[in-house]
Image: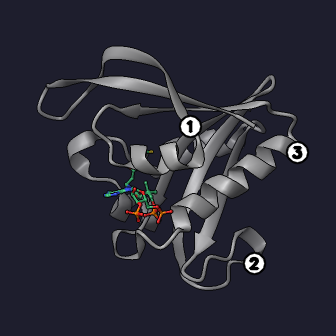
């Protein structure tokens, strides 16, 4: 939750609260990965937590629900490492594709594209921002 609170700009209303996270993690299909400041993952992560991702598995597909890295630790490959681990974990769950949905102006798009995600759909005016504005959602997919 410390990473969640630091990583997501409140303008976009994307952060989940503790209740939303714990409700999601009760479901056996929801998975979390954490990464520490040294890039170690899950059981190996013994330093301060730097980032996390949450995903959901459904019949042959994995959906990346949320990914966040503390602002001061960005740009050093932790986000990419989280997604690479997610890809490996999803393969062990027999997923053949990973999906994610993001608001149209999210700079994380660069990271997704360098990993190989391609835009496959658009939901016009899908997100409602705190100021009442609407923003498109873009769906990206990656065969794995
Ligand atoms: C997306 C996010 C997890 C990436 O984490 P990261 O550790 O910086 O990722 P990496 O270091 O592996 O990759 C960084 C690349 O992502 C892109 N990128 C991601 N977020 C960016 C941002 N806010 N500003 C600029 N570039 C960004 C850049 O292309 C960058 O590449 P570069 O370092 O070569 O310029 C992080 O920016 C973040 O927490 N963002 C806020 C939360 C969010 O919007 N999450 C996605 C929606 S759920």
**Kind of element beneath mark 3:** helix
Q: Residue at x 11, y 32 (%)?
A: 131
Q: Where does residue 56 sit, x and y in percent of width and height?
A: 67, 36
Q: Is residue 2 above or below residue 11?
A: below
Q: Where does residue 78 sit, x and y in percent of width and height?
A: 54, 68
* Ligand 1 contact, mark 2 (Cβ < 8 Å): no
Density class for disc 2 (Cα within 10 Å; few <14, some 14-19, many ≥20) is few
Q: Where does residue 138 sit, x and y in percent of width and height?
A: 41, 26
Image-based side of 34 in relation to 7, left or right: right
The one nearer the camera, 91 or 116, is: 116
Measured Cα–Cα span from mark 3 to mark 2: 19 Å
Q: Residue at x 27, y 37 (%)?
A: 105
Density class for disc 1 (Cα within 10 Å; few <14, some 14-19, many ≥20) is some
Mark 1 or 3: in front is 1
Which label number is shown at residue 62?
none
Residue at the spot of label 2: 44
Q: Is residue 128 above or below residue 39?
A: above
Residue at the spot of label 3: 92
The picture quadrant for ligand 1 comes to bottom left
- Residues at discs 1 and 3 in contact (Cβ within 8 Å): no
Residue 63 is drawn in which quadrant?
Answer: top right
Measured Cα–Cα span from mark 1 to mark 2: 27 Å
* Ligand 1 contact, mark 1 (Cβ < 8 Å): no
- The answer to whether any part of residue 81 appears in the image is yes
**Kind of element beneath mark 1:** loop
- The answer to whether any part of residue 19 appears in the image is no
Which label number is shown at residue 117?
1
Image-based side of 20 in relation to 116, left or right: left
């Amino acid at each position: 939750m410390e990473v969640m609170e630091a990583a997501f700009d409140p303008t976009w209303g994307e952060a989940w609260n503790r209740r939303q996270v714990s409700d999601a993690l009760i479901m056996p299909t929801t998975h979390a990965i954490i990464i520490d400041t040294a890039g170690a993952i899950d059981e190996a992560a013994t330093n301060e937590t730097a980032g996390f991702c949450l995903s959901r598995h459904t019949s042959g597909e994995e959906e990346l629900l949320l990914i966040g890295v503390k602002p001061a630790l960005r740009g050093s490959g932790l986000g990419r490492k989280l997604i690479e681990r997610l890809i490996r974990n999803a393969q062990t769950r027999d997923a053949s594709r990973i999906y994610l949905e993001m608001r149209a102006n999210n700079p994380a798009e660069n990271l997704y594209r360098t990993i190989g995600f391609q835009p496959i759909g658009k939901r016009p005016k899908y997100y409602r921002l705190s100021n009442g504005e609407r923003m498109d959602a873009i769906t990206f997919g990656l065969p794995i």
